[in-house]
Image (cartoon, grey):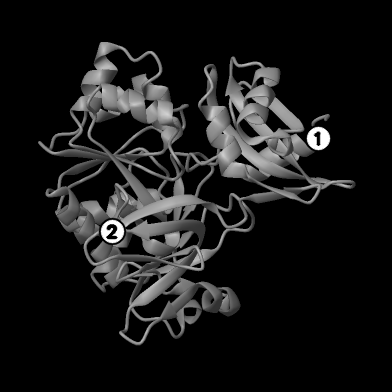
Amino acid sequence: MNPDSALAAFSASLNGEGPAVEILPGTTNNEYLVNLVDEAELEGLEEIAAVVRTSGSTGTPKRTALSVEALASSSMATAEYLGFEGQWLLALPLHYVAGLSVLSRSLYAGTRPWGMDLDRSFDAAGFNEAAAALTDRKRLVSLVPTQLQRLLTDPDAETLSTLKRFDAILLGGARAPRAVLEAAASHSLNIHLTYGSSETSGGCVYDAKALPGVEAKTVDGRIWLGGPTIASGYLGDPELTEAHFSVDDAGTRWYRTDDLGSVEDGILSVSGRADDVIITGGVKVSASGIQQVIESLPGVESVMVLPVAHEQWGQQVGAAFSGTAAPDSVREAVRATLGAAAVPRRILRLPALPLLPNGKFDRMALGALLAAATE
């Protein structure tokens, strides 16, 4: 994938020499459309450099407006936290914030990113080939857990050598399974766990600590993120903007996330989504808690737990996983750990869980599959 045309338009926008850009997917994963945003859509918003759409994993994607300040602050905070800048390998689509962040960080660092061939299924061979084209002494890449899991499943010497040459591997987009993190640690990879979203210009919390200039707090258990990396709002949706974005008396801009957690001594702990609770037969169970039990089992590669509507019980627990584990062993493990109410009533073992182009699990597709599964 050649990001040069998007890089040029994005650079002009950041420098105030062109309109805001919105990068949209093309007909293939290696193609994209660079849309110049009409100024009328940005009325009331100052110095917007880019509009990026949320993943849409739980519904209609939201068009998030990111200012020059937000993108610049994100790039500089990342470099300050890591202690260096370098050349990025672009392994994620440009029309999502993770890919866009690679462009902005490259522009501010004065380096040229190298794009992977995204039309082929992500694998070690393609990763090694693309990484070999990097020329800078310092190398960086952003990956989602599924990608790293594929690279660390029976890795050969070339793949391990390639991974170890990266000075920073940013891992985000979803919670990484414990087995993946343990494998990365066993090979002494330079992993940094990131937390953030389109609304925060990408990752703004690294290794559970807020980046320089970023603040994290909780209000009634809900995680709020604040600072100069926060987006200006959602285009065409003032009500949703008002619900999620605010500015306090000190002038700090805040984003109210959909996640629950806690902050103690500057360490952010994410416990799950606000809609994580499944109420089945009047009993509340945690989807993330069930997911953690299942993914810890031998023979389980990836797992997603979701509520499934049920006429009698209101909701049932649904679980889809890939791997060699038997569904009955999954049910038994959940029952033994969390009790009968948490046991998945709809369960599917799939060759692989469906993914969105940005590497996140496709929650809507999985929900449809589980709804159609027999109890």
Q: How many marks?
A: 2
Whether residue 129 appears in this view of the structure is: no
Q: Is residue 150 left or right of residue 302?
A: left
Residue named by callout 1: 372
User: 190 left or right of 316?
Assistant: left
The residue pinned by badge 2 equals 265
Q: Is residue 350 left or right of residue 226?
A: right
Identify the element where label 2 is drawn.
loop
Q: Nearer the viewer, residue 59 or 306?
A: 306
Say whether residue 58 is left or right of residue 27.
right
Image position of 179 with respect to 48: above or below: above
Residue 3 rendering spot, x and y as whole percentages: 33, 46
Across and down, in percent, residue 85 comes to 14, 48
Cα separation between marks 2 and 1: 45 Å
Could you tell me the amino acid type at mark 2? Asp
Q: Which comes before the other along the chain, label 2 or label 1?
A: 2
Quarter of the figure that contains the N terminus: top left
Residue 198 placement: quadrant: bottom left
Local SS, label 1: helix
